[in-house]
């Protein structure tokens, strides 16, 4: 017999159990372009519903749910009330905003929402539950075959990464170093953010050959081509470019332990004494009790890749210590993300 406690609230259980409702409302609002279509305007439910293509039955519930969730604001009540973007929606979910993070939400909606339905199978089998399970090409294999889609995908990742890379550029002490190389640099965003803040640094964004023209374009648009360059190569087949600081932003968690160790060894070989390897991730806390997002991200790696996983600062310290790194640090960046640092 369980003795019922009148003070124990089932709210957190129910909130988590029903979380997919609110998640799908937000993801659908981004898919429909609600925040982008609103922009700086104020529209009635009927006007906004017509622009988005909603059935009249859905208009009030859908937009008012977004109001209650604090992503939209509403002036007034009833049919004449006007909806507008709340500050977070305007800043992060209107695609015309330079701080837009909606790209990752589109990917969550189009791909991961349905793949997470198969979490039980992933947990029982240890196998990926992505496109490959259904006989299709893997997402990255398909992306790298088509440059416009690859660039679109990298743009989707940019909004989420920028917050962490800005924080890293502000919090890490770059004064002893002259050259940084970002491994898996995609659009060159980490190099761009660091170079903007530290004028003495030369930076190299290193990624696969199809990515190089995308990075060059973004670097040129930032006006930093004189201090930031793009280099092409395969980090599993070639040595990494020599640098004083080697960064890996959301890279290590994509791989199993054997490949993680290969990348750490490659970084060690490319660094001078005193050089630093920096891994930026949703780093799991050492006791594995606190960082819910980091732990869920690791489950997402199971769903995406099977044997890939996220890790703690203690894990990183152990692996880097085995390779020969001597000193370690962790710097909290933003939200669930931190920079794990190993010094040679």
Image (cartoon, rainbow, N blue to C red):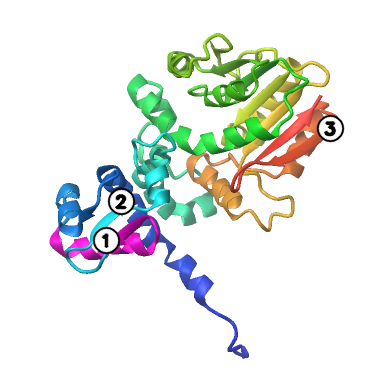
Q: Is residue 138 visible?
A: no
Q: Position of residue 101 (x, y in %)?
A: 43, 40
- Residue 95: mark in rendering: none
Q: Which secondary structure class fits the magenta region best?
A: helix
Residue found 72% across the figure and 24% down from its top:
174
Left or right: 147, with 312 as reference point: left
On the rendered structure, is 216 left or right of 82?
right
Q: Secondary structure at mark 2?
A: helix
Q: Are marks 1 and 3 in contact (CB under 8 Å)?
A: no
Label 1 sits on residue = 62
Residue furthest to the front = 76
First reached walking from the N terminus: tag 3 or tag 2: 2
- Give the image quarter of residue 163: top right
Residue at label 2?
A: 29
Element assignment for label 1: helix
Quadrant of the frame with the N terminus: bottom right
Mark 1 and mark 3: span between their CA atoms? Answer: 52 Å
Q: Nearer the viewer, residue 125 or 332?
A: 332
Residue 30 at least partly seen:
yes
The numbered mark at residue 327 is 3
Q: Where's residue 270, x and y in %?
A: 72, 15
Of marks 3 and 2, the one in the foreground: 2
Disc number lying in front (1 or 3): 1
Instruction: Establish if 95 lies above or below 248.
Output: below
Query: Is mark 2 in CB contact (under 8 Å) with mark 1?
Result: yes
N-term-proximal mark, 2 vs 1: 2
Asked if the stretch drawn in magenta spans residue 87, the answer is no
Whichever of callouts 1 and 3 sits on the residue coming sooner in the sequence is 1
- Where residue 301 sits, quadrant-wise, is top right
> Is 165 left or right of 136, judged from the image as shown?
right
Percent x, y of residue 58: 20, 62
Highlighted magenta segment, given as a residue range: 55-75
């Amino acid at each position: 017999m369980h003795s019922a406690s009148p003070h124990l609230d089932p709210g957190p259980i129910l909130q988590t159990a029903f979380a997919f409702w609110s998640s799908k409302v937000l993801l659908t609002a981004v898919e429909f372009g609600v925040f982008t279509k609103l922009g700086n305007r104020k529209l009635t439910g009927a006007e906004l519903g017509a622009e988005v293509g909603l059935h009249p039955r859905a208009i009030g519930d859908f937009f008012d749910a977004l109001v209650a969730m604090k992503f939209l604001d509403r002036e007034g009540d009833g049919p004449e009330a006007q909806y507008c973007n709340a500050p977070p929606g305007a800043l992060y979910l209107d695609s015309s905003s330079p701080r837009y993070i909606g790209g990752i939400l589109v990917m969550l909606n189009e791909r991961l929402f349905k793949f997470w339905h198969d979490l039980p199978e992933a947990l029982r089998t240890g196998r990926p539950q992505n496109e490959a399970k259904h006989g299709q090409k893997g997402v990255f294999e398909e992306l790298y075959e088509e440059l416009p889609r690859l660039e679109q995908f990298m743009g989707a990742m940019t909004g989420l990464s920028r917050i962490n890379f800005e924080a890293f550029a502000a919090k890490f002490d770059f004064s002893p170093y002259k050259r940084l190389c970002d491994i898996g640099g995609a659009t060159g965003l980490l190099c761009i953010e660091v170079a903007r803040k530290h004028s003495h640094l030369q930076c190299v964004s290193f990624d696969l050959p199809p990515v190089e023209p995308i990075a060059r374009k973004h670097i040129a648009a930032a006006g930093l081509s004189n201090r930031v360059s793009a280099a092409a190569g395969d980090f599993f087949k070639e040595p990494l470019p020599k640098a004083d600081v080697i960064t890996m932003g959301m890279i290590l968690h994509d791989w199993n332990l054997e490949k993680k160790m290969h990348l750490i060894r490659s970084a060690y070989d490319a660094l001078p004494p005193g050089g630093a390897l920096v891994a930026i991730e949703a780093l799991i806390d050492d006791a594995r009790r606190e960082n819910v997002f980091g732990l869920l991200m690791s489950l997402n790696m199971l769903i995406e890749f099977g044997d890939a996983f996220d890790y703690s600062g203690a894990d990183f310290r152990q692996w880097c210590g085995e390779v020969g790194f001597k000193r370690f640090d962790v710097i909290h960046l933003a939200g669930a993300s931190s920079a794990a640092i190993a010094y040679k």
